[in-house]
Structure formats: C-alpha cells, structure tokens
Amino acid sequence: MPKAAVKRFRRLPEEEQSRVIEMAWEDRTPFEAIDTLFGLGEPDVIEVMRHQLKPASFRLWRKRVTGRATKHTALRSPDILRGYCPTQYKR
C-alpha cells in the first residue's frame, strides 16, 4: 500500500507529477524547491521516486543525489542563488 507521500503525489495533476520527477532528477534543483512548490519534502520525494522508478533506476538516482551539495540548500555555497525563488520554476 502506498504511503501518504505517494498518495499526495497521485493527487497532483499529471503534468505536476511529471515536473516533480523531472525536478528530482535535475542535479541543480534542491529538494527545498520541490517542497516549496509541491509540498513534498526530501523524504517524500525519495518515497515517490522509489514508487515511480524501476528498482535499478531508483538505486542509481539515490546514489547520485545522496549528499550532493546541489540537491541540499544547506550544503550549497552561499554564492549560488538558484532554487531560492519559488517563481523560478514554472508550474
């Protein structure tokens, strides 16, 4: 049975579901931007990706984003301003 994050994800329009997955795949889009736009925090996005991707694709994605400075605002250099403006990402 899908968890609450997956259920919330499924309630989004198909276009927004696609955008969440696209933003999660992008190296430079922080999880905080996804949370701001869609209300899905990092643990929620991980659960959604686990549910939506094939197991091998999920493992590859997790390996890539774990600890990646560009995916976590707190780990980013203060010189990088991308991901802080909610209007930067089109819905």
Image (tube, grey):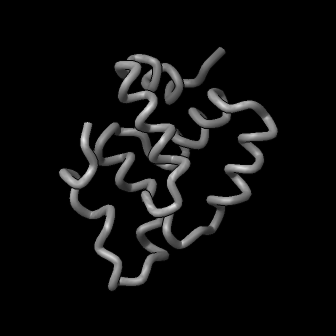
Give the x, y percent position of residue 59.
77, 46
Quadrant position of the C terminus in the picture: top left
Quadrant position of the N terminus in the picture: top right
Q: Is residue 89 left or right of residue 16?
A: left
Q: Is residue 10 left or right of residue 13?
A: right
User: In which image quadrant can residue 37 be found?
Assistant: top left
Q: Is residue 29 left or right of residue 54?
A: left
Give the vertical position of 11 relative to 70 (above or below): above
Residue at (22%, 60%) from the top-left corner?
Answer: 85
Q: Is residue 11 left or right of residue 43?
A: left
User: In which image quadrant can residue 53 be found?
Assistant: top right
Q: Nearer the viewer, residue 44 or 25?
A: 25
Residue at (61%, 19%) from the top-left corner?
Answer: 2
Give the x, y percent position of residue 82.
32, 67
User: In which image quadrant can residue 77 be found?
Assistant: bottom left
Give the x, y percent position of residue 35.
37, 46
Residue at (75%, 50%) from the top-left corner?
Answer: 60
How many marks overall?
0
Give the x, y percent position of residue 39.
35, 39
Give the vertical position of 66 relative to 1 (above or below): below
Give the vertical position of 23 relative to 67 (above or below): above
Q: Residue furthest left?
A: 87
